[in-house]
Structures are given as C-alpha cells and as structure tokens.
Amino acid sequence: MRLGVLHYTPANRAYQNASQRFNVALTRLATGKRINRAADDPAGVVAVTPMKGELIKLNRRIDRIERENAFLGIKEGGLSVQADLLLDLKGFVVQAANSGGVTPAEREAFQTEVDSILEGLRQSQHIINNALGSSSEGVLGQLGDFARDGDLNLIDGDIEEADRVINEVIEGLATTRGTIGVLIKKNDTLLRVYLTERENLAGAVSIIEDADFAKEAAEAFRADLLSDISLLAIETERGRDEDALRLLEVTTENIEDVRELASEIAVANAD
C-alpha cells in the first residue's frame, strides 16, 4: 500500500499567496478601483463614504442651478427679442407724433407695422410660455390699446399717451432683464464654487479609491511569475516525496523478505 503525502509546503503557501495577489490585481485592473470591497481597505472605505455622499449633494445642486440658468436664459433671450420689437414700436410712435408732416396713408402704414410688431411680440411670448410652462401675457398685457381698434393706435389714437405707455413698457422690460441677469450671474458664481468643490472632492475620492494601473499591471505580472515559480517548486518537492516513498516501499519489501528467510532458517534449525 502506497503512503499518501501531505503537500501543504512553503511552496504551496507561496503559490496560494501569489494566486490571490494575481486575482486582486486583475480585479483592480478590470474595475479601475483599488477598493472593491470593504476588506480591501477598511480605513479607506470609512474615509471615502462621506465624500461620496457630499458629491451626490453637489451634483444635485449643480443640476438645479444649470436647469434654473437654462430657464432664465430662455426667458432672457425671448425678452431680448421683445426689447428690440418694442424699440421698433417706439420709433413708429415717434414718427406718428409728427402730426404736421405725416399723411393719413403714412399713419396707416405705421399702424400696419405696429400690428406686425404686436404679432411678433405675441409669438415671442408664446415661445417663452411653452418653454417655461407658463401662461403669462408679458408686455402684451400693456400694449392691447396699440391695436388698430385700440385707443392708442397710430391712425387716430392718443399718440402722446402711446408714447408714455411704450416708454413705461420699455423701462419695465429692461428692469426685468436686469433682474434676470443678476440671477444668472449669481448662479454662475455659485456654479463655479460647486464645480471647484466637486473637482476637489472627486480628486480626493480618486486618490483613495481608484487603482494605479501601472502599479497593478506590474503587480499582476510579478504575482503571475511567482505563481509559475511556486508551481515548479511544488512539482520538485512532489518528485522528491515520491522518490522517498518508493525507497520506503522497497525497504519495507526487503524487510519482509528478510523476515521470511529468518523464519525458514529457524524452522530448519528446529528440525
């Protein structure tokens, strides 16, 4: 009967350690993370967890500001178009105020232009409302009397009052645009602060959590090489063990032969 050999030797332990290190390095290379489970770096997990929570908060703040700026930008862009149209309207009011040098036909032409401007303002406000999900009349609520059948039309309406109203509307619109500009500027300042803070936090998380690809690639190569060397050592040790077992078996068989011969001699002497 052959004797079994317990192959838990230093070479075996070296092989197991090298295999484990190789697998860890491959996992880090595959995920890009140095910490893939808490056991990889308990202290690192404790340090990085609150940082990730703060990053989530910063991302939400940044998203909120970017959405708000997008809405404000849409509104300000629409109001900019309206401001240009109002200046055109102001120009026709000024021309119509020259009662002595303007013919009825010219006043009719001015009013046609005003009607076109009012339609442009209506379309602009419609676009703003659709984008922002609102139903505001905007400046149109103050310009209804500039229509052809209104009290401030340029054909036979009150031109002096029309001039006062258009100046008031232009001034109010400029104030609104200025307020929007202040809000956008404030948001831009906050956004820069949050983006810088996020960049710093992300860098800190990366230092703790992310893998060094060059280092892990070198570790994988080294562990693989050590694994191969350990296997060679195991095979060498196993060969020596098997040689020793064969020697023991041969010696055991010889002892049995000697015992049988001694027994035969003893029997012969007894006879």
Image: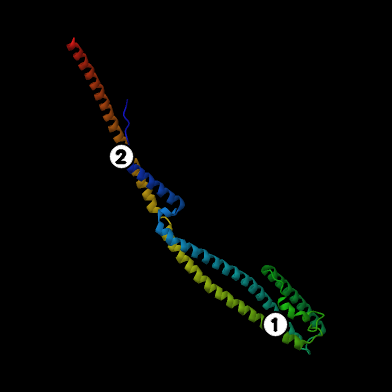
Residue 97 seen in the figure: no
177 left or right of 19 in image: right
Which label's residue is closer to the chain start, 1 or 2? 2
Mark seen at residue 113: none
Residue 32 location (% of width, % of height): 45, 53
The residue lying at 55 percent from left, 75 percent from top is 186
- Residue count near mark 1 (Cα–Cα under 10 Å), binned few <14, some 14–19, many ≥20: some
- Quarter of the image for the N terminus: give it: top left
Mark seen at residue 169: 1
Give the residue type that dot 2 points to: Thr
Residue 263 location (% of width, % of height): 21, 16
Residue placed farthest to the left in the image?
269
Residue 102 is drawn in which quadrant?
bottom right
Residue 202 seen in the figure: yes
The residue lying at 42 percent from left, 48 percent from top is 26
The residue lying at 46 percent from left, 61 percent from top is 49
Task: List the residue tagged with mark 2.
Answer: 9
Gap in Å between the C-alphas at discs 1 and 2?
A: 93 Å
**Depth order, front residue of 229/260:** 260
Residue placed farthest to the front in the image?
270
89 left or right of 254 in image: right
Secondary structure under tag 2 reads loop
Give the residue type that dot 1 points to: Val
Secondary structure under tag 1 reads helix
Above or below for 22 versus 170: above
